[in-house]
Amino acid sequence: MRNGFKVFDADAHVVYPRDLWSRYLDDKHKHRVGTKQPMPGFETYNPVTVDGKWTQHPTVLYGRF
């Protein structure tokens, strides 16, 4: 509490356990759990794929807006 107000840090980052989705997701959805895949030219950055598609590559959203 600060100056009578409850304070919430909305910029906090949450780090989930690596096995969160594979452990708690229903079996019927587990085949869609994202996996990190190495990408040539991005050795320090392994984007996640879901259903075989890149989800976190810098060009994924290019041209959509």
Image (tube, rainbow, N blue to C red):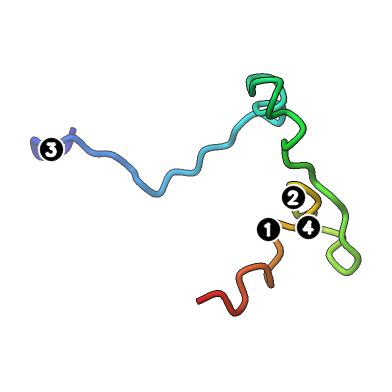
Q: Earlier in the sequence, mark 3 or mark 2?
A: 3
As helix, strand or loop, the secondary structure at mark 3 comes to loop
As helix, strand or loop, the secondary structure at mark 1 comes to loop
As drawn, the label of residue 45 is 4
Q: Spatial distance from mark 3 to mark 2, Cα to Cα? A: 39 Å
Instruction: Where is residue 22? Give x, y as percent.
Output: 72, 25
Q: Residue at x 58, y 36 (%)?
A: 15
Instruction: Where is residue 31? Give x, y as percent.
Output: 77, 32
Side of 4 relative to 38 (left or right): left
Badge 1 is on which residue?
A: 56
Instruction: Where is residue 44? Give x, y as percent.
Output: 82, 58
- The disc labelled 2 sits on which kind of residue? Val
Q: Residues within 10 Å of mark 4 (few under 14, many from 20)?
A: some
As drawn, the label of residue 48 is 2
Q: Quadrant of residue 39?
A: bottom right
Badge 3 is on which residue?
A: 5
- Residues at circles 2 and 1 in contact by the CB criterion of under 8 Å: yes
